[in-house]
Image: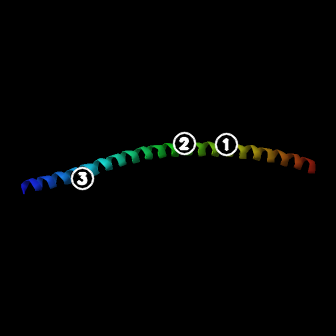
Amino acid sequence: MVTDLFNTLEQKLELVLSKVNTLQEANAALQRTLGEKEQALKEAEATLARVSQEREAVRERIDKILNRLKIIDTGESA
C-alpha cells in the first residue's frame, strides 16, 4: 500500500520534472528566436533610417534643380 503510494508519487514527480524540462527547453528556444527577431528589427530600422535619409537627400536635390529651372524660366520670361 505505502509502496504503491510512493510509486505513484514518484511517477507524478517524474512527469512534472519532464514537463518542466520541456518547458525550459521551449523557453530557451523562444528566447533565441526573440533575440534573432530583435536583431532583425534593429537591422530593418537602420535600413529604414538610411533609406529615409537618402530619400530626403534626393528630395533636396530635386528641389534645388526645380528652383534653378524656375530661375531660368523666369529669366527667359522677363
Is disc 2 surrounded by few (<14), some (14 to 19) or many (20+) residues within 10 Å?
few
Q: Quadrant of residue 32?
A: top left
Along the viewing direction, whichever of 44 and 1 lies nearer the viewer: 1
Extreme-bottom residue of the structure: 1
Q: Position of residue 23 (x, y in %)?
A: 32, 50
Badge 2 marks a residue whose secondary structure is: helix
Callout 3: helix, strand or loop? helix
Q: What coloring was used for the rendering?
A: rainbow
Which one is closest to the eye, mark 1 or mark 3?
A: 3
Q: Residue 17 appears at what percent x and percent y?
A: 24, 49
Tell me the SS state at disc 1: helix
Q: Is residue 11 left or right of residue 45?
A: left
Marks 2 and 3 sit apart, C-alpha to C-alpha, by 42 Å
Residue kind at label 1, given as amino acid type: Glu
- Identify residue type, mark 2: Glu
Q: Earlier in the sequence, mark 2 or mark 1?
A: 2
Viewer can see residue 78:
no
Which numbered marker is on residue 78?
A: none
Residue under pointer 2: 43
Q: Which mark is residue 15?
A: 3
| Label 1 crowd bin: few (<14), some (14–19), many (20+), radius 10 Å | few
Residue labelled with disc 1: 54
Q: Is residue 42 left or right of residue 72?
A: left
The residue at 69%/42% (across/down) is 57
Question: Residue 68 placed where, x, y %?
Answer: 82, 44
> Dot 3 surroundings within 10 Å: few (below 14), some, or many (20 or more)?
few
Q: Residue at x 11, y 56 (%)?
A: 5
